[in-house]
Image: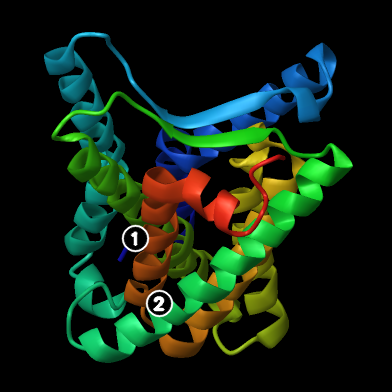
Amino acid sequence: MASRRFYAWEVGIVLALSLGRSAVYAVLQLAERLSIAPLSEQSATVQRSRSRAEFFDFSYQLLDSLFALTPVALVIYLVFLGAGNPFRSWGLDFRRPGKDWVLGTGLFAVLGLGTLAVYFAGRSLGLTVQIIPADVAEYWWSTPVLLFAALRHSLLEEIIMVAYLFDRARRIWPQLNGATAGLWILILASAALRAAYHLYQGFGPGFGNLVMGVIFGWLYLKYGRVMPLVIAHFLLDAVAFLAFPLVLTTFGLDSL
């Protein structure tokens, strides 16, 4: 069995290859934004066209999502090396499709409304940049590629930030098991990292993702399944990528 030090190095390497690296860059981007102009006068685009040529744009978009999923494949492989089955132990399967979808869509509805409220408050207070979820050319493949990007974000964040990180943390610190205070520290640490890699959008999204991380972490520890979190995150990103202007208009936020 691997030692605690081995798991600690493993987690450090995985985060450095994925969301930990994103957090470092996001903090630097926020600092740069604050040095340039007020956040209210700036914008951030999550998914953008990469080329004016259709073939190359499609290729870049698809490859971006495929390569971004490499850390997910890595952590699944590492767990299998330890004679574990991450799909079953993390609840990343289809054993409870009905309950997973009910919880996932419920989370989507609640967090979607909460996201709009945080965005409105952040824009009103000058703490959030104008967010453009997707700025891509319209081709026949644009919608499926954006849906794949939404799936990529949901798998990457929920598998690494929740399922994998919680699994490894409890191996590094076995005393966490059954310790309420320790588990809440784990939830808050994961949520803080989630908030950090969204800071390039401003303080509002950072706070919103901190709350989202706490809710997701608590639900994962309660039910032991990451699939509802993946579903909720996928729906949030899918709606943002495909219909964000319409959502803002519907709720009267399009002037922000």
* Callout 2 secondary element: helix
On residue 13, which mark appears? none
Which of these two is toward me, 49 or 81?
49
From this viewpoint, which residue is outermost toward the top?
Answer: 52
116 w.r.t. 56: above or below: below
Dot 1 crowding, Cα within 10 Å, few <14, some 14–19, many 20+? few
Seen at 37% across and 76% down, the residue is 228
Q: Point out residue 164 in the picture as x, y percentages from the top left corner.
A: 39, 62
Q: CA distance from mark 2 to mark 1?
A: 38 Å
Q: Point out residue 156 in the picture as x, y percentages from the top left corner.
A: 36, 50
Which of these two is toward me, 10 or 102?
102
Which of pointers 2 and 1 indicates the residue nearer the eye?
Answer: 2
Which of these two is toward me, 136 or 232?
136
Query: Does the image show residue 208?
Result: yes
Seen at 72% across and 81% down, the residue is 181
**So how many labels did they put on this image?**
2
Q: Point out residue 101 in the picture as x, y percentages from the top left corner.
A: 31, 81
The quarter of the rendered structure image containing the C terminus is top right
* Callout 1 secondary element: loop
Seen at 29% across and 52% down, the residue is 151
Dot 2 crowding, Cα within 10 Å, few <14, some 14–19, many 20+? many
From this viewpoint, which residue is outermost toward the right?
Answer: 125
232 w.r.t. 94: above or below: above
Asked where in the image residue 134 lies, by quadrant, the reply is top left
Q: Point out residue 176 in the picture as x, y percentages from the top left corner.
A: 59, 78
67 w.r.t. 95: above or below: above
Which amino acid lies under the numbered mark 2 shown in the image of this protein? Answer: Thr
Which residue is the site of mark 1? 2
Which residue is the site of mark 2? 105
Seen at 51% across and 81% down, the residue is 219
Task: Confirm or deny contact between disc 2 and disc 1 (CB under 8 A).
Answer: no
The quarter of the rendered structure image containing the N terminus is bottom left
